[in-house]
């Protein structure tokens, strides 16, 4: 839905978007059932269902950063505080995605943080194996297999440089993310039956 329609709906007096909230509840329920109840019955099914729940959770984080389902930003962001995705901090995703939206030079490798392109000079300086890896990453299969690892590596290495340079906003994003991983680990340790390696696999998928 276009942002102007979303803003109009928010301004019309609707304090809670119930359909979005219902999807949140269903996603949390699926995640809890898959990690706690399904694993002893079928590890494969549990992993796939957990991956589905995490993927839906990721989609919902996109809704939250655009101001849904509550008028209150803090209340909406509380819904995505538990870091189901484990690999990508919500605040970093929010900042980078909004930068992508406000960037007039979409797909520009220097200006657009979500670009998968390389500048000609950078491409010429790359080794042949790295070029082959990036070419493969631009296919559907490559994006599914290598895409998460490449994106996470680029995010983590770039953010570490930013933190060392004194970027407090980036440090805050990772600090909140690490805090958000705690309830996930507590759930998996106390109530869940899924081992950590399987959860990490589901999150990667």
Image: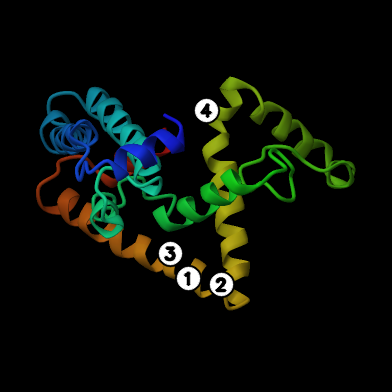
Question: Between residues 130 and 162, which one lies in front from this camera angle?
Answer: 162
Name the image colouring: rainbow
Marks 1/2: CA distance?
Answer: 6 Å
Q: Quadrant of residue 147?
A: top right
In this rendering, position of residue 113 left or right of residue 190: right
158 shown above or below 29 = below
Q: Residue at x 65, y 47 (%)?
A: 103
Identity of the residue drawn at 10% across and 33% down: 37
As measured in the structure, the alpha-carbon distance from the residue carrying label 1 to the one carrying label 4 is 28 Å
Residue 77 % position (x, y): 29, 54
Q: Earlier in the sequence, mark 1 or mark 2?
A: 2
Q: Which residue is mark 4?
A: 144
Element marked by disc 2: helix
Distance from Cα at disc 2 to Cα at disc 3:
10 Å
Per the rendering, the mark at residue 75 is none
Residue holding disc 3: 174
- Do the CB atoms of the residues marked 2 and 3 lie less than 8 Å apart? yes
Q: Secondary structure at mark 1?
A: helix
Considering the image in quadrants, where does the C terminus appear? top left
Check disc 1 and report the residue beneath it: 171
Determine whether label 1 and label 2 are within 8 Å by CB.
Answer: yes
């Amino acid at each position: 839905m276009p942002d102007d329609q979303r803003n109009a709906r928010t301004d019309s007096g609707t304090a809670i978007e119930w359909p979005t909230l219902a999807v949140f509840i269903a996603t949390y329920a699926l995640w809890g059932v898959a990690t706690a109840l399904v694993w002893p019955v079928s590890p494969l099914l549990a992993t796939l269902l957990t991956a589905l729940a995490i993927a839906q959770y990721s989609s919902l984080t996109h809704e939250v950063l655009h101001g849904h389902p509550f008028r209150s930003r803090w209340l909406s962001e509380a819904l995505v505080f538990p870091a189901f995705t484990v690999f990508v901090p919500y605040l970093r995703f929010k900042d980078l995605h909004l930068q992508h939206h406000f960037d007039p030079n979409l797909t520009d490798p220097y200006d657009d943080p979500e670009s998968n392109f390389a500048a000609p000079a950078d491409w010429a300086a790359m080794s042949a194996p790295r070029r082959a890896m990036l070419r493969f990453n631009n296919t559907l299969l490559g994006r599914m297999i290598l895409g998460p690892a490449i994106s996470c590596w680029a995010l983590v290495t770039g953010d570490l440089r930013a933190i060392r340079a004194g970027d407090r906003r980036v440090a805050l994003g990772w600090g909140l993310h690490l805090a958000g991983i705690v309830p996930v680990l507590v759930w998996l340790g106390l109530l869940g039956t899924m081992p950590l390696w399987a959860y990490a696999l589901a999150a990667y998928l």
